[in-house]
Amino acid sequence: MTRPVIISHEMDATWRYASGVAMERFANNLLERRIEAMQCGECKRRYLPPRPFCGNCRVPLTDWAPVASEGVLEAWTVVYLPIVDNRTGITRDGPYAMGLIRLDGADTTLNHYVAETDPACLKVGQRVKAVWREELRGAIDDILHFEVLE
Ligand SMILES: [Zn+2]
């Protein structure tokens, strides 16, 4: 039996890509601290983050609907390992909490940071609210994180 050859290699990659029509409008709305979901014309399901097709009806989405900047924590986890933010290159040390947040008016969840990191203080169903960056850039991190309201 031969041992596998392991080659360590670090890559530094920079890339740019077109956001697409849905994410372009989503990002431009963030510049005005406004959040919109895409809504299916048939089943009325509201998708956030916005997407170009309804997963239920398999039809293109063209309608937009405003949603609140507050909602419900549907799931969460606390992470203890640092990560490098791929948008900024800045390391986020642990612990930090990630949540799946269903904003009021949306039918799907948004994955984002939650300010609370004590697992004893996080509960499914808690109300949370977006905390906005002071200077907006038209990106998802215009919302710094969500804070627990209860
Ligand atoms: Zn649909």
Image (tube, rainbow, N blue to C red):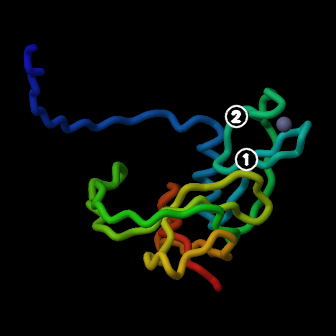
At 66% from the left and 54% from the top, the residue drawn is: 109
Residue 61 lies, in percent from the top left, at 78, 35
At 48% from the left and 69% from the top, the residue drawn is: 144
Within 8 Å of ligand 1, the CB of disc 1? Answer: no
Establish if 84 lies above or below 56.
below
Establish if 122 lies above or below 22.
below
Establish if 92 lies above or below 5.
below
Tag 1 or tag 2, which sits nearer the N-term?
1
At 77% from the left and 34% from the top, the residue drawn is: 54
Q: Residue 47 carries which label?
A: 1
Relative to the observer, which residue lies in front, 115 or 122? 122
Residue 63 horizontal side relative to residue 49, left or right:
right
The residue that disc 2 covers is 52
Label 1: few (<14), some or many (≥20) within 10 Å?
many
Name which residue type carries label 1: Tyr
Residue 145 lies, in percent from the top left, at 50, 69
Residue 79 horizontal side relative to residue 59, left or right:
left
Give the spatial CA distance, label 2 vs label 1. Answer: 9 Å
Instruction: State the SS at label 1.
Output: strand
The residue positioned farthest toward the front in the image shown: 1
Q: Quadrant of ligand 1?
A: top right
Relative to the observer, which residue lies in front, 106 or 76? 76
Name which residue type carries label 2: Pro
Quarter location, residue 84: bottom left
Label 2: few (<14), some or many (≥20) within 10 Å?
some
Residue 29 lies, in percent from the top left, at 64, 57
Residue 27 horizontal side relative to residue 64, left or right:
left
Count of marks placed on residues: 2
